[in-house]
Structures are given as C-alpha cells and as structure tokens.
Image (cartoon, rainbow, N blue to C red):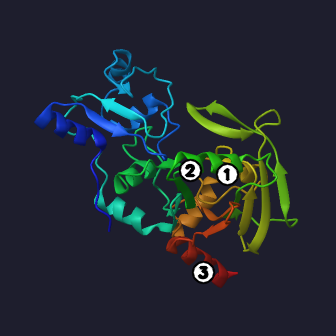
Amino acid sequence: MRTLGQPLYLIYQKMQTSHNKATLVTISENQSGQRIDNFLLKHLKGVPKSHIYRLLRSGQVRVNSGRKKPHYKLQTDDTLRIPPVRVAENTADHIPSSVIQILENSILFEDDNIIAINKPSGIAVHKGSGLSFGIIEAFRQIYPEQPLELVHRLDRETSGCLLLAKNRQILAQLHELLRHEKIVRIEKTYLALLSGQWQGGSKTIDTGISKIKRSGEHIMQTDENGDRAISHFEPLEIFNNCSLMKIKIETGRTHQIRVHALHSNHPIIGDSKYGDKKTNQFFRTLGLKRLFLHAQQLHLPLTDPITINAPLSDDLEHLLQKLRQTT
C-alpha cells in the first residue's frame, strides 16, 4: 500500500515555521502548460483564492526571478518562487482510510500516463455541492507527487471505468479523442437495466439534451434544440419486467443515458431522478439499492491501443442471477 502524502501547503507551512524562507519549485515536464494561478490553487491546498491572487499581484510569487500574470503558463524547468504561506494548521479535508483502501483496490490499469479505476457507486468524482471530497481528491492524496486530473466524469451513482491522467499531455490527447465529431475516438460502453421489456432490437437515439429547473432542482431533458447527444442501445437479455442493455455513447452529455432511456419509455431501474418510483420500490425488495448503470468498458485508440474492462459489482451480479432464475 502506498504511503499517504501531505498536501504541499503543509510542507510549505512547516518550512515557514522552521526557516521562514521561500520555497523554490522547479517545474517538471508533466507540470508544464498549466496556468500559474491554477498551479498554486491546486498545490497550496487550504490557502484562500483571494490570497493566492494577492501574492501574484504583489510579486511575492515569481517565475525565474520575474513577476508573472495569473494567466501565465508554466514551462518546463521554470523556477517558481513561493513565499512563506500562513494558513490554518490543517484545513485539508479528511478522507476516511476505508475510502482510500476501497479506491486503491479499485485500480484496473496503470501506466506512466493514466490510472483507470472501477469507480464504486455512491462516490462522487470530485468534491462540491456539500461533499468534502471526491475520487480525484482521494487519488491526489494517494499519489501526492502526481499532478492528477479527471479525464472524464461519471455520475455519483454510476459505477465502472473512470480515467485519471497523470500529466497534461495525455490529458489533452484523451480530451481530443473524446470529441464526438472525431472519426477515431474513445469508445464508451455501458450496461444498464431498464424498466420493461425492450422491443425492436438495437436502436440509436440521436436527440439533443438541455438543462431545465423543475421544483427547485436542475434536471436534464430531451430537446431538439439542445446539445446533440447520441446513444446506441442494444438488448442483451430480456426478463419478465426489465431488460439488460448494452449502451454505447458517442457524446458525453450530463445524464445522457438516463435521459435517453427515459425518452425510450424504459427508464433505468434505481434512478431516483428520472426513473419510475413503483418499479424502483419493487427492485429494492430484490436487493437493488442503487442506480443500475455501469461503465463496462473503455477503448482508448492510442498509439498502443488500450481496452479497459470493469466487472459488475457483486450486488448487480446477484440481482441478475435472481432475474435469470425467475424468467
């Protein structure tokens, strides 16, 4: 198991306490290309944003002995001077060791450029909206020396393949491969259990999606004038009251599969936002306590192509076994 590292701002704080001196950081190739303000915001955890911009404006932060604007993009071998930073003793959010262990055990693939995990359902990909941490914050704690970034996102309740980039070069390359208008692009395949018996074989839904506010909550809906969204649905198994589907998506709109499933009149089982309440209640009696949507596979068309497969969690496998026994 890897040793958990401290956020850089705590290291700087200790230096300040004992030496009261500035810290010099040499920018590596993996760190180059980042705006200096973003670099400082990420690595000086707990330091207020306003204070970081004040340090830049006043010239206390310097690059190669010179002042730089917040939008300056750091270059390989730049020498970054960071002054002593006074912050609270430890404002880093606590991430339970049990979560760290689960995420360490979820790693499916790792090389010099990427980490692929089988994301557990129920853990958000990043903090916000009342959440003190997410997967990216946890992995930055697991890999304190790596400038990790999310390549893409999954809904909090969705499980399966999730990619993290170890450097900005691979991040830019993968983002380019995610663009749906590209002929060669990342292939995303999902498994979903939909309400009702699917009719008519494979079907492509090419319908735009837009955001609306309903009862004080933001939700997505199909909209011909919305952002284009393309999902390919293929039935794998048809049960008495539900259908196991393989879904490939060409675009990555928010809640895309969930909204397109609802548009087909077969919402995803366990979906508290777009699903059918009575159906969800019935499947809870069978042991399903989450959204049945799983990112099963990612194919990365790199120079050396990579295909990553994420197995279903035990609870989803057990449900499918029950359904097969009663069909």
Residue designated by label 1 = 258
The part of the image, by quadrant, that contains residue 85 is top left
Q: Is residue 8 left or right of residue 146?
A: left
Which circle's residue, 3 or 1, is located before the other in the chain? Answer: 1
Between the residue at mark 2 and the residue at mark 1, the CA separation in whole angstroms equals 10 Å
Residue designated by label 3 = 321
Q: Do the residues labelled 2 and 1 touch (CB within 8 Å)?
A: yes
Residues 320 and 104: in front is 104
Mark carried by residue 96 = none
**Disc 2 vs disc 1: which is toward the camera?**
2
Residue at left offset 64%, top offset 84%:
325
Crowd tier of the residue under label 3, counting other residues whose Cα lies within 10 Å: few below 14, some 14–19, many 20 or above: few
Residue 274 visible in the current orientation: no
Residue at left offset 33%, top offset 27%:
48
Crowd tier of the residue under label 2, counting other residues whose Cα lies within 10 Å: few below 14, some 14–19, many 20 or above: some
Q: Callout 3, which amino acid?
A: Gln
Q: Residue 178 in the image: x percent, y percent?
A: 69, 49
Q: Dot 2 lies on which element?
A: loop
Extreme right residue here? 200
Q: Are marks 3 and 2 in contact (CB under 8 Å)?
A: no
The answer to whether residue 158 is above or below residue 237 is above
Between the residue at mark 3 and the residue at mark 2, the CA separation in whole angstroms equals 25 Å
Residue 198 visible in the current orientation: yes
Residue at left offset 28%, top offset 48%:
94
Mark carried by residue 155 = 2
Q: Dot 1 lies on which element?
A: helix
The answer to whether residue 322 is above or below residue 30 is below
Q: Callout 2, which amino acid?
A: Asp
Q: Dot 3 lies on which element?
A: helix
Crowd tier of the residue under label 1, counting other residues whose Cα lies within 10 Å: few below 14, some 14–19, many 20 or above: many
